[in-house]
Image (tube, rainbow, N blue to C red):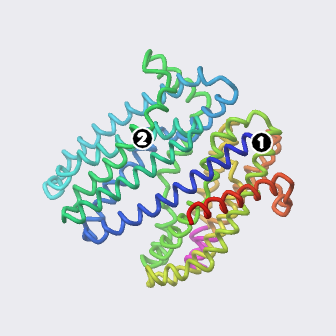
Amino acid sequence: MSSVYKDIAKGSAIIMASRLVLKLFSIVSYFMILRALSLKDYGFVSLALSISGPALSISGLGLDDLLLSQGARARGEKTYGEFSSVFGGFVLVRLLILAGITALLLFIRSLLGQQYLEVVNQYLWQAILWIWVVNIRWIGDGMTQMFEKFKLFSVANVTESALRAGIVLVLYVIGHLNIGTVLWAYILSKGLPTFMVLPAMRHLGGWGRPILKIKMFFSYLKQKGAWETVRMLSGSLLSGLNQWIVAGLLGLEAVAIYNFASSLNSLLAQFSPFRQILYPIVSRLSSEAESASALARRMSKYSIWLASLLLMAATFGAPLGVWLLAPKYLNAIPAFYLLMLSQLTNAATVSHGPLMYSNNEQKYLLKLSIFGTVSGVTVMPLLTWLFGVYGAILESHFSTVLISWLREKRLREKHGIKTFVFSDIFVIDAYDKQAIKKVWQAVVLRLRNAL
């Protein structure tokens, strides 16, 4: 197991470092785009880029996480050769669905009135190209994660962010930052680093016998993926429901407060790399209950330690940062404080996703998803009406904690895997001391070299 922890430590360090660099470049490009574009133009850019989200979900039939998890498990069980045909069929089906989405967008364009046709015609092909680039890039990124090539994954993402910032900076300086050039900046910065992850695509097993691979994928979908497809696609259709409830009961200003608090919480979550690292590694070990439990419990403990540090930093740093950058949102800080407690729940259950997927619990996850939806449309409106924005946040805590408890119960009773024990948080064993010592020595060494 020591080699596994070394892989996690190395991968976590790479992911955290890359995310810090990513945020820096993202802020630079985001600030320049906001300054150059009007609110209307930036809104159009946001809508054009947002098309990739539903397209990615639909083209992948909601199976992205499941297949990455199962692929990692197949690697651990030395059966990836057989699984590669299933994944290759999935990629072919994804591309065929993308072709259908492209045709549908072109058809919808013909139904638009003259008022919208001109602007849509001007940028439609860029939007379509963006969808294809995002999907092809996902294939490469998915393969790098499945085979635990975290350094390559991070380098490609940092390159994308740096390239976008560079293109936007040049366009800003020469005064040519507009809707079209911003879209091209996103397309080029997303597409060019795809060549960096192309070597990982060799694990797809080639493009021979495509019909057979597609048949194998659909057979796999029927056996293991049908419930996940229903769950993910239905979840996509209901995404954003909480914002509409807040808007209907409290108004648009409350929505702004809720969204701003959620954005701060999402930013905080970016500093925890463990989920991305653990997905392939836990999936690979999931067939060994004892090893999976040991790894999951230790990583839950480390995740909670890190989340606690982040919460303390955010408690003191968030008010100052908001006061300096967005003072009109200072009244969102109490909502953020309440919402950021979700970091602890997420940390305690960091291994749930890969373990549930790799142990074929898609049907059970669908049941939990239905419960979450029912709670969202019944309990949330009531709590929002009683307590405002805080009520909406309380409902999210309630449903998340209950669903997390049910997943943990399922893993323990059916698969013999414990992912979290409360007393672990307060235990520092010999391995922890050694790990902390190595981390401290590495930090000191880096500081000395920097100075």
- Above or below, 76 against 426 in this view is above
10 Å neighbourhood of mark 1: few (<14), some, or many (≥20)? few
Residue marked by disc 2: 137
Please determine whether, in this image, residue 358 is positioned above or below residue 349: above
Q: In the image, 335: left or right of 284?
A: left
Report if the CB atoms under discs 1 and 2 are less than 8 Å apart: no
Say whether residue 227 is visible.
no
Q: Specify the quadrant of the image occupied by residue 125.
A: top left
**Quadrant assignment for the C terminus:** bottom right
Residues drawn in magenta = 380-394
**Helix, strand or loop under label 2:** helix
Q: Quadrant of residue 42?
A: bottom left
Seen in the picture, residue 305 relative to 195 is either above or below; the reply is: below
The correct choice, above or below, for 290 with respect to 326 in the image is above
Q: Amino acid at mark 2?
A: Arg
SS for dot 1 = helix
Q: Position of residue 201 (x, y in %)?
A: 47, 30
The label shown at residue 352 is: none
At x 69%, y 42%, the residue is 356
Q: Which residue is mark 1?
A: 2
What kind of residue is marked 1?
A: Ser
Percent x, y of residue 293: 80, 44
Q: Quadrant of residue 101?
A: top left
Q: Is residue 220 magenta?
A: no
Image point 67% across, 24% down: which residue?
A: 78
Report the front residue among 301 and 164: 164
Q: Nearer the viewer, residue 424 or 341?
A: 424
- Whether residue 74 appears in this view of the structure is yes
